[in-house]
């Protein structure tokens, strides 16, 4: 006789996710302006590189954005522990030399976006992603391409944390991060869908969905990492 335990599994999944959101929400509320300011600074800094001639501009922007996103983990850790940010405090973290490589690795979601754009729109998809030429692309096309980053980003979400908070090498950080995400795949899957929805809404909201919800979601990612790390 087969025993159905799906309801219990579902309850456990949402219970874990609820704990992550509760911890992330508390962190977000403790320093909301610093989080918004830091996230906005990352977006603006990475965006400035798109002023360079295409396609180098978009590639440089994504690489710099990925490195700054990785570097945000020590910022979150410091804000979580001290509610303040100081460059002296950031110097106590290790792994900074691995940022260029971890940045390249965490650009994989962008590579998948480019692949999906090519499947959906052919050569025009490549022109859209690499050169910003919209052509006949609709908002639905652009929203779908944005959201396509979420699945691969889920597997790489914790790699920068292991590099900069866990004192790992780049290769070990990627392996440990993926292993952690797979081990908690059910709540991570739901979190990935939430992130995908926020990204999907970006073209329809002039990126306000990502700007307003992004700081909270990075806090949730930090809470997830700390919770899963405690169980290792």
Image: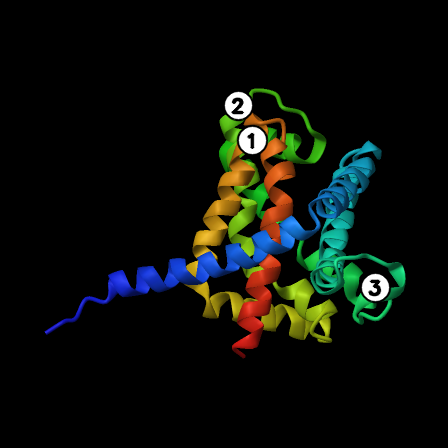
Q: Is residue 139 visible?
A: yes
> Is residue 108 among the parts visible in the rendering?
no
Q: Position of residue 216 (x, y in %)?
A: 60, 48
* Dot 1 alpha-carbon crowd within 10 angstroms: few under 14, some 14 to 19, many 20 or more: many
Please identify, in this view, whether the residue under mark 3 or under mark 2 is nearer the observer: 3
Asked if the residues shown at circle 2 and circle 1 are in contact, with their CB atoms under 8 angstroms apart, the answer is yes
At horizontal 57% and vertical 47% (from top left) the residue drawn is 112
Nearest-to-viewer mark from 3 and 1: 3
Residue 24 or residue 224, whichever sits in front? 24
**Left or right, 141 with reference to 101:** left
Q: Which residue is mark 1?
A: 142
Where is residue 50? Give x, y as percent.
79, 35
Q: Reading the chain from its start, which is encountered first: label 3 or label 1?
A: 3
Front-most of residues 11 and 100: 11
- In the picture, the quarter occupied by the N terminus is bottom left
Question: Farthest bottom residue?
Answer: 232
Separation of marks 3 and 1 at Cα, in angstroms:
36 Å
The local secondary structure at tag 1 comes to helix
Distance Cα–Cα, label 2 vs label 1: 6 Å
Question: Vertically, is 228 above or below 68?
Answer: below
Mark seen at residue 90: 3
Q: Is residue 32 left or right of residue 25?
A: right
Residue drawn at (58%, 73%), measured in percent from left and top? Answer: 229
**For mark 3, does the 10 Å Cα neighbourhood hold few (<14), some (14 to 19), or many (20 or more) residues?**
some
Indicate the secondary structure of the residue bearing disc 2.
loop
Quarter in which the C terminus is drawn: bottom right
């Amino acid at each position: 006789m087969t025993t159905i335990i799906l309801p219990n599994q579902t309850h456990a999944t949402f219970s874990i996710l609820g704990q992550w959101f509760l911890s992330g929400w508390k962190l977000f509320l403790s320093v909301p302006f610093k989080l918004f300011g830091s996230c906005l600074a990352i977006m603006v800094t990475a965006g400035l590189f798109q002023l360079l001639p295409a396609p180098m501009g978009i590639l440089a922007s994504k690489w710099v954005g990925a490195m700054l996103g990785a570097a945000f983990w020590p910022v979150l850790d410091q804000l979580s522990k001290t509610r303040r940010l100081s460059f002296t405090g950031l110097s106590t973290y290790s792994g900074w030399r691995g940022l260029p490589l971890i940045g390249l690795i965490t650009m994989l979601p962008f590579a998948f976006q480019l692949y999906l754009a090519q499947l959906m729109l052919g050569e025009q998809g490549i022109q859209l992603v690499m050169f910003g030429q919209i052509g006949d692309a609709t908002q639905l096309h652009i929203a779908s391409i944005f959201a396509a980053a979420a699945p691969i980003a889920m597997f790489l979400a914790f790699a920068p944390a292991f590099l900069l908070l866990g004192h790992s090498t780049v290769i070990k950080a990627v392996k440990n991060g993926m292993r952690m995400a797979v081990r908690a795949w059910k709540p991570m899957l739901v979190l990935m869908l939430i992130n995908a929805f926020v990204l999907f809404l970006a073209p329809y909201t002039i990126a306000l969905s990502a700007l307003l919800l992004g700081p909270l979601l990075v806090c949730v990612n930090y809470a997830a990492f700390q919770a899963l790390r405690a169980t290792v």
